[in-house]
């Protein structure tokens, strides 16, 4: 099962969460004119949101992409959406719907006997329903009345004889449209118990339905109070009795008020608890005791143990207690924390021992706190678990919009030995060791997360299965301060969106021992970054992989005591904005490819290093077992690169190929380094290159290049900021002011052509736009003419400039 979830996440980062879109209602023929009024209802019956962008619908033609469902966008847990052949506005009016997402104008034209097929963004079949009273004799005919699908019939189904047509006032909330049809489009299956009219929100209509039933504490509602029109369920409770204690009082009203959303506004995830059912309870923590209303919970002193799947609303505080989960039944155990404060003197305040799946929902507007001791007392002295203030042996999801502060005084703050998924909430994790750890994987799609950890910040550390041990961040705001790595995975790390502020090992001004890893983002197998904003202050590499790295987007501000980006084998930069303000080496990999993006890097050694092996392999000659010199490579096919380096500006233990882009190098002032340094060849066929630096170890592009270059050698160093200009027939090709003293300048551009004469000026002024020492546009006012030259070779060297 875990492998299936892992593969699903590779297809779509949203589908790894517990979201599940299914077909829940349909009517093939209504009473409309021009359009039939037919509709299909899709519902997210899972516990997490699903983004339906790229999803589609078709009938028995079974062609993915036929009818786009992208307009539905993100579908919340419990939310229903509608596809109809009518204009969306007309359908909403006919059925008195507000706040329901509707796609109108469908051309599918369902028949009496047909098929409904739902496809995800990858064209994978998600759900299929085959129906028709002619094809399946004895089943319903959905003409003028819809058919609702019970929970037992979800996914890949055929119409069953046991299903019945919609009837006014049935358990699905069916009603009569203005045209006389009977259905419940847009209604939530098993809708929230707080949503008394089952229309996906809690508004004044729900309050008005509740008020006549409010009789007061201890007053049973048999007979019903005057004006209360609610029908008792099979267990005798009415909908207004939200805490199911046989009266409707201020406690119930307070629960309704807490979940009030307003007309058309979806409910907070913490309010999606359905009414009734086994394992639904209120757990009230009273400091030194616990009170439970409902089933599925046992209490032993100040320890409450959930023993069955269901939803549990938890409030109050325990000075020394525990909330445990030991449910051996199938289904999700959902803990809604609503103003919870639990401390414990011997073990974890919340411990999930066993559950098919556990979910912690942080109630809207609530503040929740967990704190463990500095020393644990273990039932089995041979084991060191639990070892986090919030600990789970099984899959755990944290969601909601409230806050949770977890203090791990013993070891970790939040830890799951299985999967850990965070989709929302304001979470603060303080830990003596790791802040937040998901052993099999850690998946973050939302929320505001602050971590202060003596060890690693976010961590996934499954060493046994190569398909696990990964971290994926698809959204949210993360602020992590760690003594070790800020984000570290056993296998791979992927970031597609979000805001990340990372400080590891005390930051870039701290020298750490060789035995400590204090990187910003680290993953031995691969790092893939598609987007997001990053502010990284690291005592070690900012972003690191022992194998491969791909940067396809993102905005980076980096200060590091070591490398900005380091991948032992391959590093590809396709897009993004990278600003490395401090580093030992800016970007390093054995095989480095830059296809796009904007890169600025400042380094105390090499700016860009194409070298094989682990960190530092470009600093000293290779030792035994390391790749030989010449094994590195650099390919520049596009982008904008500006380098300020005290060592080599660009250093490649092998070959350089440049086909496009802009490269600006403010190189070293000492003669034992050069603006460019390579062991093999440097073939340039396109792009713009200017590299200024010392005169002791100058290298130019190779004579095997197809684009021409010029090398200017000065008699003595020119002061930093001294403007130089190269022009042909009065047209400026280069106007450049190196930021450091320089004695050599190498320039290559498509504008350099054979047989033409060129003039070189020093000083003067330029009215153009200055960026990274390079002027573009404007007019250059000449200073002093230094020399003239004519290009006749691929590489032209001009010596002894004054």
Image (spheres, rainbow, N blue to C red):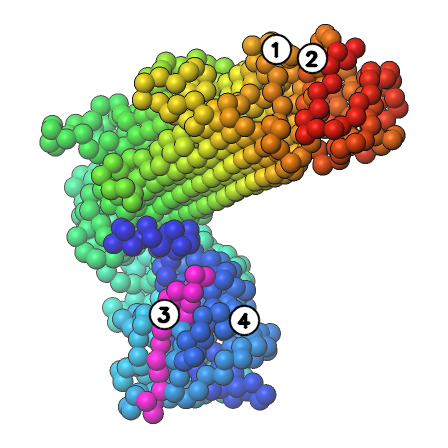
Instruction: Identify the mark nearer the N-term, 2 or 1.
Output: 1
Identify which residue is drawn at 16% across, 27% down: 377
- Residue shown at 18%/29% (left/top)? 384
Q: Choose the circle earlier in sequence order: 4 or 2.
A: 4
Label whose residue precedes the other's in the sequence (1 or 4): 4
Magenta stretch: includes residue 131? yes
For the question of whether residue 540 can be seen, the reply is no
Compare marks 2 and 3 and give the one earlier in the sequence.
3
- In which quadrant is the C terminus drawn? top right
Image disc number at residue 103:
4
The local secondary structure at tag 1 comes to loop
Q: Is residue 179 left or right of residue 150?
A: right
Q: Residue under circle 1?
A: 696
Nearer to us of marks 4 and 2 is 2
Q: Nearer the viewer, residue 307 or 699?
A: 699
| Boundaries of the magenta span | 118-135
Q: Quadrant of residue 732?
A: top right
Which residue has dot 3 on it?
Answer: 127
From mark 4 to mark 3, how far is it between C-alphas? 18 Å
Instruction: Give the mark nearest the N terminus, 4 or 3.
Output: 4
């Amino acid at each position: 099962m875990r492998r299936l979830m892992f593969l699903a996440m590779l297809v779509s980062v949203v589908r790894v969460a517990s979201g599940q879109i299914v077909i829940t209602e349909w009517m093939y023929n209504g009473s409309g004119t021009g359009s039939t009024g037919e509709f299909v209802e899709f519902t997210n019956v899972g516990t997490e949101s699903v983004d339906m962008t790229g999803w589609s619908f078709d009938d028995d033609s079974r062609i993915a992409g036929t009818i786009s469902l992208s307009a539905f966008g993100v579908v919340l847990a419990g939310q229903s959406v509608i596809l109809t052949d009518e204009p969306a506005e007309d359908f909403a009016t006919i059925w008195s719907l507000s706040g329901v997402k509707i796609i109108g104008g469908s051309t599918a034209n369902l028949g009496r006997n047909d098929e409904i097929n739902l496809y995800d963004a990858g064209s994978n079949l998600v759900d299929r329903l085959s129906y028709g009273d002619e094809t399946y004799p004895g089943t319903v005919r959905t003409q003028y009345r819809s058919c609702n699908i019970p929970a037992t019939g979800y996914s890949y189904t055929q119409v069953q004889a046991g299903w019945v047509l919609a009837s006014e006032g049935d358990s699905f909330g069916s009603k009569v449209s203005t045209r006389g049809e009977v259905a419940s489009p847009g209604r939530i299956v098993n809708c929230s118990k707080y949503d008394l009219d089952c229309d996906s929100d809690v508004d004044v209509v729900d309050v008005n339905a509740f008020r006549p039933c409010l009789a007061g504490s201890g007053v049973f509602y048999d007979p019903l109070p005057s004006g209360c029109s609610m029908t008792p369920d099979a267990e005798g409770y009415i909908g207004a009795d939200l805490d199911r204690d046989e009266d409707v009082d201020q406690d119930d009203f307070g629960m309704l008020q807490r979940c009030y959303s307003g007309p058309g506004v979806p409910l907070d995830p913490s309010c999606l608890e359905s009414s009734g059912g086994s394992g639904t309870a209120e757990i009230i923590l009273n400091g030194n005791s616990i009170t439970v209303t409902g089933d599925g919970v046992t209490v032993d002193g100040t320890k409450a143990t959930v023993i069955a799947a269901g939803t549990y609303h938890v409030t109050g505080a325990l000075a020394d207690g525990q909330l445990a989960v030991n449910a051996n039944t199938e289904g999700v155990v959902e803990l809604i924390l609503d103003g919870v404060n639990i401390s414990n003197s011997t073990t974890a305040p919340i411990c999930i021992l066993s559950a098919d799946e556990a979910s912690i929902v942080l109630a809207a507007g609530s503040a929740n706190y967990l704190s463990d001791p500095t020393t644990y007392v273990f039932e089995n002295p041979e084991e060191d678990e639990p070892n986090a203030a919030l600990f789970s042996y099984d899959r755990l999801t944290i969601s909601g919009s409230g806050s949770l502060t977890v203090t791990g005084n013993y070891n970790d703050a939040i830890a799951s030995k299985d999967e850990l998924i965070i989709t929302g909430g304001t979470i603060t994790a303080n830990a003596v060791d790791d802040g937040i750890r998901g052993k099999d994987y850690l998946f973050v799609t939302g929320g505001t997360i602050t971590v202060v950890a003596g060890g690693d910040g976010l961590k996934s550390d499954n060493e046994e299965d190569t398909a696990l041990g990964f971290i994926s961040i698809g959204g949210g705001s993360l602020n992590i301060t760690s003594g070790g790595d800020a984000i570290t995975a056993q296998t791979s790390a992927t970031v597609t969106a979000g805001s990340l502020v990372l400080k590891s090992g005390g930051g870039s001004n701290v020298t750490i021992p060789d035995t400590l890893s204090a990187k910003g983002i680290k993953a031995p197998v691969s790092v893939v970054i598609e987007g997001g904003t990053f502010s990284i202050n690291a005592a070690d590499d900012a972003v690191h992989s022992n194998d491969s790295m791909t940067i396809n987007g993102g905005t980076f501000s980096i200060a590091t005591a070591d490398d900005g980006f380091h991948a032992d084998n391959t590093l590809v930069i396709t897009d993004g904005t990278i600003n490395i303000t401090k580093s030992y080496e800016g970007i390093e990999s054995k095989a480095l490819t830059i296809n796009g993006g904007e890169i600025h890097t400042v380094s105390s050694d090499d700016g860009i290093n194409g070298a094989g092996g682990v960190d530092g392999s470009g600093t000293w000659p290779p030792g035994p077992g390391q790749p030989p010199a010449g094994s590195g490579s650099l390919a520049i096919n596009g982008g904008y690169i500006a380098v300020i380096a005290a060592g080599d500006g660009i250093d490649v233990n092998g070959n350089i190929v440049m086909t496009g882009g802009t490269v600006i190098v403010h190189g070293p002032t000492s003669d034992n380094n050069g603006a460019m340094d390579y062991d093999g060849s440097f073939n340039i066929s396109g792009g713009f290159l200017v590299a200024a630096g010392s005169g002791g170890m100058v290298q130019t592009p190779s004579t095997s290049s197809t684009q021409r270059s010029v090398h200017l050698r000065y008699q003595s160093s020119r002061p930093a900021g001294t403007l130089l200009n190269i022009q042909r027939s009065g047209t400026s090709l280069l106007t450049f002011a190196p930021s450091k003293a320089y004695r050599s300048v190498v320039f290559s551009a498509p504008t350099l052509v054979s047989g033409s004469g060129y003039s070189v000026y020093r000083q003067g002024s330029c009215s153009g736009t200055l960026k990274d020492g390079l002027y573009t546009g404007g007019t250059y006012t000449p200073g002093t003419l230094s020399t003239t030259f004519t290009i006749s070779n691929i590489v032209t060297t001009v010596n002894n400039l004054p």
